[in-house]
Amino acid sequence: YQGTNQVYYIQPEKVNAYEGGLKTQFLDRRVQLNLAGFYYDYSNQQLQDTRAGPVSFLVNAPSSEVYGFEVETTLRPTAGFRIDASLGWLHSKYKELTLQGADLSGNSLPFAPKLTAQLGFEWDVVDLAGGTITFAPNMAYSSRQYFSPFNEIDAPGTPQVNSELQQGANAKVNASLSWSNDALTVRAFANNIFDRKTYGYGLDLRGAGFPYNFLVPSAPRTYGVSLRYSF
């Protein structure tokens, strides 16, 4: 990009990515288990650096890494009943990064919760009027995640309060009740049933002279009805 008196060049982002996994079925296909592991080694990873103004600059992080694993399982103990569960563990780190005079080496990457999990089931409750009524609740968990590469560090000489730019650990419960046949599905749903107040994004504005930071709420409790017809 071009500044007032100078042209800045951004290095291309490069990553060495390694992944491996396993998909299995056993007990007469009543149990399915999927395992996956990964390691990403970044050089010159591109990221946005928001500075006073507020103005965002595209910059390079010289070195960063992400690695972790995921486990997914589906259990079918009886006909008409299925349990789904998943677990993910993630390590993310800037191995080398300095922004606005602050050494951020060792900080976590933004939007990278260390632990995520999901648990739910689908239960075909009863056959009715040529279709099946299915009840499907689920719970989704996420550990803390940061919205900024600064994490909780403030740039020297600025009024930044970057500790506000994060979302703590939280769990949300969703559920649906549907009736379906071969062609038609009528579904009533409710998401975030307990109306957990969370944020999905945050941006430093205190460093730009505002008396607050910019935080975007995630969706509150929502509910509705959907109709799907296949032909």
Image: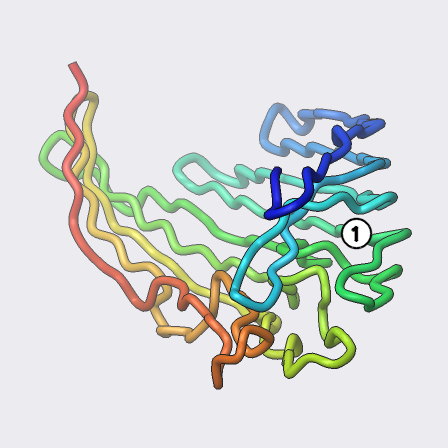
Residue 195 position (above or below residue 29): below
Residue positioned 57% across, 61% down in the render: 141
Q: What SS does tag 1 mark?
A: strand
The disc labelled 1 sits on which kind of residue? Ser
Query: In the figure, residue 155 lies in which quadrant?
Result: bottom right
Q: Position of residue 214 (x, y in %)?
A: 46, 71
Residue positioned 36% across, 73% down in the render: 195
Nearer to us in this view, 161 or 187: 161
Instruction: Report the number of numbered marks.
Output: 1
Residue positioned 46% across, 65% down in the render: 172
Which residue position is annotated with label 1?
92
Instruction: Judge the density around disc 1: few (<14), some (14-19), many (≥20) Cα neighbours within 10 Å.
Output: many
- Left/right placement of residue 69 relative to residue 202 reads right
Q: Residue furthest front?
A: 5
Q: Residue furthest left?
A: 129
Quadrant for the N terminus in the image: top right
Residue 85 position (above or below residue 79): below
Q: Position of residue 160 (x, y in %)?
A: 64, 78
Nearer to us in this view, 222 or 99: 99
Q: Position of residue 108 (x, y in %)?
A: 77, 59
